[in-house]
Every structure is written in structure tokens, then in C-alpha cells.
């Protein structure tokens, strides 16, 4: 069905983003160590997605600002051109 991960080892500073993580509950040890590791992996992935979403929103806002600036520059050029004609 999915990738079975037993004891995934992801460095703390990792930017890993992958597919959904599936694991077999019967493989959990008495203290649920594998569950905690996989849960940590999923949380890191979700955090990376949130960070990328923020970057996307910031980039979209930046693009809108640039487009607005270009529009204002074109409007000023047109006003200058019309002023010369008059």
C-alpha cells in the first residue's frame, strides 16, 4: 500500500519532504518508539509545507506589488505622453 518505514532516521536539520508515511501498528515496541519517530517525521514534513506556503504567499504579494508598480509606471508614462500632446 505504502512505504513501510521502520525506525526512520532523519537529521534534525533536515528539509526532507516525501510521500505519506505508512507504518504497521503491530511493529510498535512496548513504548511506542516507532510511532513517535514516524509522528516526528510527519510533523517535520507538515512544518516544511507551512513554511513553503508562507513563502508562496509572500512571493505572490511581491509579484502583485511589482505588477502594481509597473502599472503605475505605465500610467505615468501615458499621462506624460498625453500632456505632451496637449
Image (cartoon, rainbow, N blue to C red):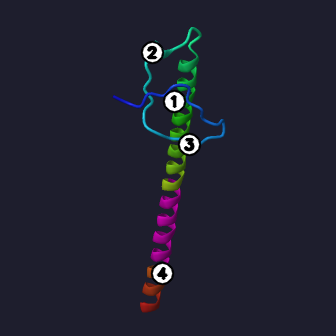
Q: Nearer the viewer, mark 4 or mark 3?
A: 3
- The region drawn magenta spans 61-76
CA distance for labels 2 and 3: 30 Å
Q: Earlier in the sequence, mark 2 or mark 3?
A: 2
Residue that numbered label 1 is attached to: 42
**Is 81 on the left or on the right of 54, as rendered?**
left
Element on which disc 2 rests: helix
Which corner quadrant holds the N terminus? top left
Question: Who comes first in sequence, dot 1 or dot 2?
Answer: 2
Main structural element of the magenta stretch: helix, strand or loop?
helix
Helix, strand, or loop for circle 4? helix
Image position of 53 with respect to 61: above or below: above
Residue located at (47% from left, 65% from top) = 67
Considering only order in the chain, which callout, 3 or 1, is on the residue closer to the N terminus? 1
- The percent position of residue 36, horizontal first and vertical second, equals 57, 20
Image disc number at residue 77: 4
- Closest to the camera, between mark 2 and mark 3, is 2
Residue 77 position (above or below residue 32): below
Q: Quadrant of residue 37?
A: top right
Mark-to-mark CA distance, 1 and 4: 52 Å
Q: Quadrant of residue 54?
A: top right
Residue 44 percent location from the top left of the image:
56, 34
| Residue labelled with disc 3 | 51
Q: Residue at x 42, y 26 (%)?
A: 22
Q: Which circle marks residue 25 in the picture?
A: 2
70 with respect to 36 (left or right): left
Other-residue count near label 1 (Cα within 10 Å), few / some / many at <14 / 14–19 / ≥20: some
- Determine if the magenta segment contains residue 48: no
CA gap between label 4 and label 3 equals: 39 Å
Q: Nearer the viewer, residue 16 or 23?
A: 23
Upstream in sequence: badge 2 or badge 4 = 2
**Are the two marked residues, 2 and 3, in contact with CB atoms closer than 8 angstroms?**
no
Amino acid at each position: 500500500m505504502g512505504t513501510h518505514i521502520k525506525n526512520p532516521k532523519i537529521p534534525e536539520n533536515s528539509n526532507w519532504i516525501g510521500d505519506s508515511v505508512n507504518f504497521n501498528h503491530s511493529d510498535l515496541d512496548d513504548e511506542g518508539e516507532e510511532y513517535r519517530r514516524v509522528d516526528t517525521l510527519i510533523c517535520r514534513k507538515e512544518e516544511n509545507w507551512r513554511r513553503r506556503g508562507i513563502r508562496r504567499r509572500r512571493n505572490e504579494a511581491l509579484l502583485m506589488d511589482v505588477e502594481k508598480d509597473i502599472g503605475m509606471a505605465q500610467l505615468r508614462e501615458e499621462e506624460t505622453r498625453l500632456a505632451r500632446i496637449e
